[in-house]
Image (tube, helix red, strand yellow):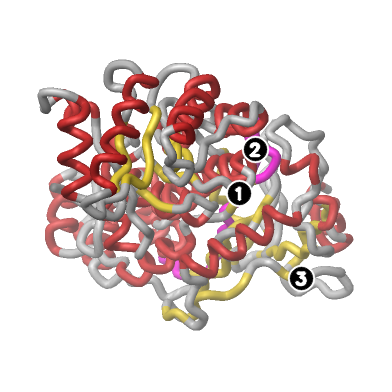
């Protein structure tokens, strides 16, 4: 299967980046330039975003090169001079990378990542970093809302089968785990990232047996320590009674049914009925897992209704960020050898200069954030952008997935209530420093 890896990563590029690079080459432009990837806006449904994807950016920049096959393909387009293509064969990322750590809440206007490198290098990675950070931040931000809605009840990422491609499933599983999912159903994500994997059975397994009892009995004997039985293939409450009977039958063999799963119907009402059946049968320890079209709103409503659900499976709507399936991230030139740069397009202006984000206070809310110049002094708060690469080499490894997950959990716990809410909160603008304000005024004149 075609896959983006060290051999192909250089071609994760829009053609216009190559045409600009060819023009820069013709002009002998080798000077350094600084680009920033910023969050221009949030969807109306979001009060914050959670940074993700930085680790993959570091890995991709370390692998960046055009191999013979890539160069032969570019040559076949008939658009580029041979000298330019030969120059691409020597391209490696030699610049600096600064980024806000994964798991950090961020707000509109803030740069999440900053690259300073020779102009061609900095330009040709635009699509790669936008795709990497934009997608994973989008999924982590959606999953963080599920985490807040679940209020401590564990949930599992069930979304691999509905994501937009295998790579999205893999990176989405990592992003969801970073933002609080307890496990994933995707085995590859378990292998690649060490995420706990979780799964039960499908309706096809039940349908393939003469009866529900036969299916439950066989599955539980195969997995005597962790069987979770899917009980809604026919009638959910009847399925619960059969599961309880099978659990009683198998208890004498030392086999214990760990849980039952509901995947359809009115989950609040059915979970109450199932809980009653299991308790009356003497199995209060059998957990109830609920899935089927859930997102943060569905999870919130079930929790609010007092549904006796012990865990959730959350799939399609989380892993495609169903209500907000894109994130408005941009990658813009902010400075080069001639000084700061500022775009003034209507509705799409940018802040000039090499910047830093300073966060005052411990709750991670935007009222404590100030965007300032990277070398500006006198600004209160912790600088969020941290250097990860210099001279194309890693100088400070990005946070591990476990560290990013812990950071995200701590950040979500301390966000103010209006930002933790699933309802849209009034937008609190991120501040700008005196240095930024003076620079904007100067360039505007």
Residue 126 rendering spot, x and y as whole percentages = 45, 52
- Do the residues under discs 3 and 2 have CB atoms within 8 angstroms? no
From the image, tell me which residue sits under label 2: 42
Residue 281 rendering spot, x and y as whole percentages = 41, 34
Q: Residue furthest front?
A: 252
Give the quarter of the image for residue 438. bottom right
Q: Callout 3 environment at 10 Å: few (<14), some (14 to 19), or many (20+)?
A: some
Residues at marks 1 and 2, CA–CA distance in whole angstroms: 26 Å
Residue 105 rendering spot, x and y as whole percentages = 66, 54
In this rendering, the label closer to the viewer, 1 or 2: 1
The span shown in magenta is: 28-48
- Residue drawn where x is 16% and y is 51% of the image: 75
Q: Is residue 38 magenta?
A: yes
Mark 1 and mark 3 lie on one chain; the one further toward the N terminus is: 1
Q: What secondary structure is found at the residue carrying circle 2?
A: loop
From the image, tell me which residue sits under label 3: 382
- Do the residues under discs 1 and 3 have CB atoms within 8 angstroms? no
From the image, tell me which residue sits under label 1: 152
């Amino acid at each position: 299967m075609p896959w983006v890896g060290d051999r192909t990563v250089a071609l994760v590029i829009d053609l216009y980046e190559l045409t600009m690079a060819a023009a820069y080459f013709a002009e002998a432009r080798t000077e350094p330039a600084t680009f920033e990837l910023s969050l221009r806006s949030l969807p109306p449904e979001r009060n914050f975003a959670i940074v993700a994807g930085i680790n993959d950016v570091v890995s991709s920049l370390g692998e960046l090169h055009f191999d013979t096959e890539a160069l032969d393909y570019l040559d076949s387009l008939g658009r580029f001079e041979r000298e330019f293509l030969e120059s691409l064969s020597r391209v490696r990322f030699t610049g600096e990378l600064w980024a806000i750590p994964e798991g950090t809440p961020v707000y509109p206007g803030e740069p999440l990542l900053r690259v300073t490198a020779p102009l061609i290098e900095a330009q040709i990675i635009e699509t790669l970093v936008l795709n990497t950070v934009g997608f994973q931040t989008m999924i982590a931000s959606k999953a963080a809302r599920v985490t807040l809605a679940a209020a401590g009840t564990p949930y599992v990422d069930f979304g691999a089968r509905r994501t937009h491609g295998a790579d999205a499933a893999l990176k989405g599983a990592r992003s969801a785990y970073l933002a609080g999912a307890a496990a994933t159903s995707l085995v590859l994500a378990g292998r690649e990232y060490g995420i706990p994997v979780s799964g039960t059975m499908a309706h096809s397994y039940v349908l393939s047996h003469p009866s529900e009892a036969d299916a439950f009995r066989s599955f539980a004997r195969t997995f005597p320590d962790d069987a979770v039985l899917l009980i809604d293939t026919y009638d959910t409450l009847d399925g619960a009674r059969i599961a309880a009977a099978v659990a009683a039958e198998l208890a004498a063999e030392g086999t214990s049914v760990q849980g039952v799963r509901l995947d359809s119907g009115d989950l609040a009402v059915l979970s109450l009925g199932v809980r009653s059946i299991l308790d009356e049968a003497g199995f209060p320890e059998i957990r109830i897992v609920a899935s089927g079209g859930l997102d943060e709103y569905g999870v919130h409503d079930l929790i609010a209704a007092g549904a006796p659900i012990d865990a959730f499976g959350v799939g399609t709507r989380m892993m495609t960020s169903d209500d907000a399936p894109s994130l408005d991230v941009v990658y813009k030139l902010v400075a080069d050898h001639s000084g700061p740069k500022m775009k003034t397009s209507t509705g799409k202006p940018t802040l000039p200069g090499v910047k830093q984000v300073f966060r005052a206070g411990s709750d991670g809310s935007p009222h404590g954030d100030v965007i300032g110049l990277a070398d500006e002094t006198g600004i209160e708060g912790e600088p969020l952008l941290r250097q990860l690469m210099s001279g194309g080499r890693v100088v400070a490894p990005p946070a591990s997935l476990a560290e990013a997950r812990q950071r995200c959990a701590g950040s979500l716990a301390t966000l103010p209530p209006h930002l933790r809410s699933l309802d849209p909160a009034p937008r609190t603008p991120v501040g700008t420093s005196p240095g930024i304000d003076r620079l904007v005024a100067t360039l505007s004149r």
